[in-house]
Amino acid sequence: MPRTATIANPTDGATVHPDLTTGHNGPNREDFLFYAGQVDQIDDQQDALRKRRNAVRRAAKNAGIELKDMDWARAQRDFDPETVADEFKRRAQYAAWFDLAAEIPTDLFAAADKRASTEDLTEQAKRDGYERGVAGDSMDEQKWLPMTPEGQAYAAAWHEGQKVNFDKLRKLNADMAAAEKAKAAKAAKNAKAAKAAKNAKAADNDDDQHPDPDAQNGPDDGFYDSKAAE
């Protein structure tokens, strides 16, 4: 006989939660289907994005980009240039202590330092706009106000960068579509070959189970046996 327990009524102002198993004050069927459907849709979107991300990274690798270095550089964008330069020098020093590499050449950061010291605001705006355009980033009008000369230079350069982005994106999508088509064709070819092999094996098994009765009488040598015919 199952044991039972008595639950005392809550005291001292304790909160009584509704019983969601009775259908009162709880979710109904439409709520359940709606939220389950929302989660399913988000999962599908994430799967599609993950698939495209992997394909883009493969394309980047095929273009000669070292993925781990690209990931590192992407992560450094949130730091100031001095911090990034210090990390370069620190790693080079550690490598030198292992006799793995010489110190970083003194001119490695010279170009960036010179540009930062001599580039005026208009040139900075052009470079910033072009880089954001090529990367596919939206135009940030807060950094370079549209009504200023720098802001106008920034916008013009951003549009130029967008043209480059569109061209590269069109080629990337075409290459990815071709790769998917080739993958599907290969899968279909393999499936067809597997089916043919399966059918051939089934035919061999059928021959083993149902031998040819004529073959059991010996080979036909072309001679007529008159005695056997009588």
Image (tube, grey):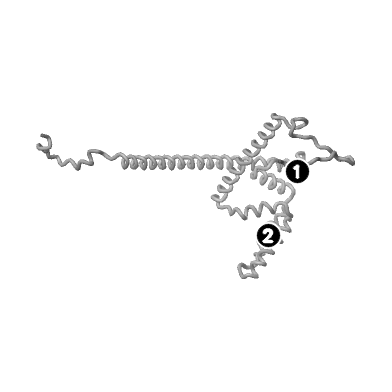
Place of residue 203 in the rendered image (x, y in percent of width and height, measured from the top left): 34, 40
Residue at x 77%, y 35% (from the top left corner): 19
Asked if 209 appears above or below 67 in the picture, the reply is above
Number of residues whose C-alpha sits closer than 10 Å to that of mark 1, classed few (under 14), some (14–19) or many (20 or more): many
Question: Which numbered dot is residue 166?
Answer: none
From the image, which quarter does the N terminus lie in?
top right
Q: Amino acid at mark 1?
A: Trp
Measure the C-alpha gap from mark 1 to mark 2. 26 Å
Residue beneath label 2, please?
Answer: 109
Res 129 → quadrant: top right
Res 151 → quadrant: top right
Number of residues whose C-alpha sits closer than 10 Å to that of mark 2, classed few (under 14), some (14–19) or many (20 or more): few
Task: Give the camera-side residue of 52 and 2.
Answer: 2
Q: Amino acid at mark 2?
A: Phe
In the rendered structure, which disc, 1 or 2, sits on the residue that comes first in sequence?
2
Task: Give the camera-side residue of 138 and 221.
Answer: 221
Residue beneath label 1, please?
Answer: 144
